[in-house]
Amino acid sequence: MDTQQILSELEAERDRLEQAISALKGSMSGRRGAGPVVKGRRGRRRLSAAAKRRISEMMKKRWAERKRAMKAA
């Protein structure tokens, strides 16, 4: 294999890599928040209406018990 053939194959490979990179960059630009993805970090968790209601009832019960304890002391 001569030097000119090696150079032309390397240049062809470079062109393919540049096309792949630009395609990947283009697909990332359509994504919301196109910044880097941080591993291990999640989005905000959403509670269902039933879960909110259950938590609300438990907190009301907790505060009622504390209020009773304060009056007894």
Image (cartoon, rainbow, N blue to C red):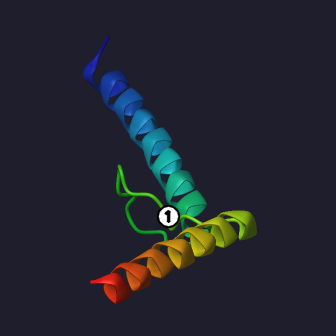
In the rendered structure, the answer to whether residue 14 lies left or right of residue 34 reads left
Q: Quadrant of residue 57?
A: bottom right
- How many marks do you count on the picture? 1
Q: Position of residue 34 (x, y in %)?
A: 48, 69
Q: Secondary structure at mark 1?
A: loop
Q: Nearer the viewer, residue 2 or 12?
A: 12
Q: Nearer the viewer, residue 12 or 55?
A: 55
Q: Residue at x 52, y 52 (%)?
A: 24
Please, which residue is most extreme toward the front here? 72
Q: Quadrant of the N terminus?
A: top left
- Above or below 21: residue 55: below
- Above or below 4: residue 35: below
Q: Position of residue 70 (x, y in %)?
A: 32, 86
Q: Nearer the viewer, residue 61 or 56?
A: 61
Q: Quadrant of the C terminus?
A: bottom left
- Above or below 66: residue 24: above
In the rendered structure, the answer to whether residue 17 lies left or right of residue 55 reads left
Q: Residue at x 35, y 57 (%)?
A: 38
Of the residues shown, which amino acid type is indicated by label 1?
Gly
The local crowd at label 1, few if under 14, some if 14 to 19, many if 20 or more residues have their Cα within 10 Å, is: few
Q: Residue at x 46, y 72 (%)?
A: 62
Q: Nearer the viewer, residue 26 or 39?
A: 39
Q: Position of residue 4 (x, y in %)?
A: 32, 27
Please, which residue is most extreme toward the top here? 1
Q: Disc 1 designates what residue?
A: 43
Q: Position of residue 28 (x, y in %)?
A: 54, 61
In the rendered structure, the answer to whether residue 1 lies left or right of residue 24 reads left
Please, which residue is most extreme toward the right here? 49
In the rendered structure, the answer to whether residue 17 lies left or right of residue 19 reads left
